Structures are given as C-alpha cells and as structure tokens.
Amino acid sequence: MDLLDPKILDRISNYAILSRNVVEGYITGLHRSMFHGFGNEFVQYRNYAPGDDLKYLDWKVYARTNQLCSKVFREETNMNCRIVLDCSASMSFKGKESLLSKMEYASMAAASLSYLACRQGDKVGFYAYADKIQCAIPPAGSQRHLHEIFAKLKTLEATGAGEHKDSLTKISDGFKGRGLVIFISDMLEGEAEILQFLKAMRFSNNDCILMQILDDDEIEFPYSKNVRFVGMEAGDELVTAPELVRENYKKNLESYLDQLKQETQANQIDYKLINTAHSLESVLAAYLHKRQEMR
C-alpha cells in the first residue's frame, strides 16, 4: 500500500497523523545517509558502504571486530525552511475524477514538508495568502510549533483573487536570515509577481523551490461534450466544444510550462510540476535533495 497515494491520503483528515504516516512511510526505503550529516556530535555507527568518505572510518572498531564501520554525526547547522502557500480561488479546482482539490493536495504537501523539516532538525515557517495574508508563522522547530501549522492548515480555504504583489511584499518583509523558500501554487494567475518574489529571494541568498500543483484535468483536458468554463477568480465564462480547442489548449499549456521551466532555471530556482493524481513522493524528494545541496 502506497501511503503517499491520494487514494489513501483522502481518508486521513488529521494533518498530524497524515504527515507522520507520509514521511515515515517515505523514508523507510531510503538510504540512511539522506537523513544524517557529518557534524561534531556523534550519533551512531553504520556499516561502511563503497563510496563513503574514508576519513569517517573507525579503525579502532575495525581492529576489535574486523568490520569496517563509519561514524555518523548529527548535523550542526539547522536550516530555516519557509513554506508559502497560494490560497487564491483557482486552487479550489477539483477535476471530475480527482479525489483531492489542488488546495487539499497542496495543504497535505505543506503539512508533510513541515513535518519532514522538523524531523530533519530544521526550523519551519508557514505563510498563506489570497486576497490578503491569511497566515504568517515564523520559523521554529518545536512540536508545539508544528501543531500550530497543522491547526492553521485545517482552517484555510482557497477563495478570492490573489493579491500576489502586496501580500508577498508583506510576507518577505518578515523574513529574517537566509534559508530555503518553498512556494506552492498552481501558477495559473499572478505568475509574474510570484516569479519576481522568488527572484528576490534568490538575490537575498535563499534557495528556492517552486512547486506547481495542477489537476490532471488541467493537464490532459479530457472533456468530450460541450462544456461551460467559469473563471474561479475573475468569474468570466466560456462555452465551447472541447474537440475544437483541445489541441490549442494543450499546445499553449506546454509552451507556458516550458517557459516557466526556462525562467526558473535561468534564475536558479528549482521547479517541480506536480499532478494531484500522483503521490507526494516527488514533493518530499524535492525538499530532501535541495537540503542536501545546501549542506
């Protein structure tokens, strides 16, 4: 059973339970080196594996047991991880066959990332906004702090038009020190302002990950009958025959996504497109890989 699968996650309403199950289930199969650094505080020994740094071999243990063992140390430096969630109305979209809306999926991703950050010894902050700032929790690393984030996630709804520029300016004004910024959004509105915010974060020596959350229907455009589309933020309407617009829609979406990849790459921003039909594994992997790069 894949604990990261939306079919399983949809049944869990408690974010504390969900995040623990997701993260602990995910890391079980990973190499232990993903979760330990080499600092000054000794934690344990582990069997030597080809490619390990030889300077961490304990030759005294080898002399006694004839086994090669590497010392594992606790990472000394903690990282500030700030998660920013776009809660504008377009995030409430949920396809006909989807188990989770984009907002529900993004909230689960934020909960799991928060839990993983704390498990790694990092401090995590959480920020959410739509037409105004809905939440601004500065980074900390306690269990009480983590549950404060979970409690806030339960109250959030995707509603209103995103006031991206003003909200992100106010959010960034409260940032102290460098670290990792994870931005979660569908990037279907306000993309210029969001990218400007992330560029400013990079200029301030923060590492950045942009996680674009899209529903499978938005990617595949599976509609077959005449359909009326209603803008979730502006309220504009369009009635059309899907077979007449599908090719252009998919071509324009592909072009936009390629442009987004190029712009993020040019500004050294990690970019991850996430389909709500897929498991949370890619979300957690993106965080862990970026964290390792920052060591």
Image (spheres, grey):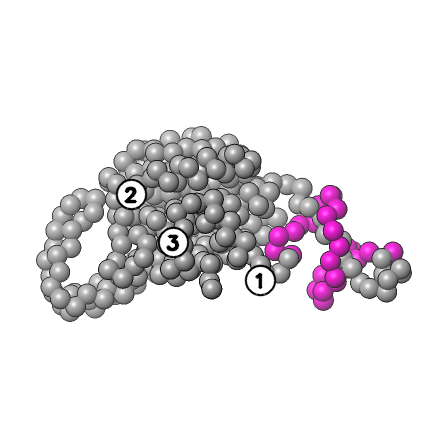
Report the amino acid beneath label 2. Answer: Ala
Asked which secondary structure carries label 1, the reply is: loop
CA–CA distance between discs 3 and 1?
Answer: 23 Å
Q: Which label number is shown at residue 11?
A: 3
The part of the chain drawn in magenta is: 33-60
In the rendered image, the residue lying farthest to the right is 63
Quarter occupied by residue 89:
top left
The percent coordinates of residue 12 (x first, y second) are 40, 51
Asked which secondary structure carries label 3, the reply is: loop
Say if 201 sits above or below 223 in the image.
above
Q: Is residue 46 magenta?
A: yes
Report the amino acid beneath label 1. Answer: Gly
CA–CA distance between discs 3 and 2?
Answer: 20 Å
Query: First in sequence: mark 1 or mark 2?
Result: 1
Label 3: few (<14), some or many (≥20) within 10 Å?
few
Q: Is residue 146 left or right of residue 136?
A: right
Residue position for label 1: 29
Q: Is residue 149 magenta?
A: no
**Disc nearest the viewer among 3 and 1:** 3
Quarter occupied by residue 240:
bottom left
Q: Which label number is shown at residue 158?
A: 2
Residue at x 75% of width, y 55% of height: 45
Foreground residue, 235 or 200? Answer: 235
Say if 14 sits above or below 100 in the image.
above
Residue at x 38% of width, y 53% of height: 11
Q: Which label number is shown at residue 192?
A: none
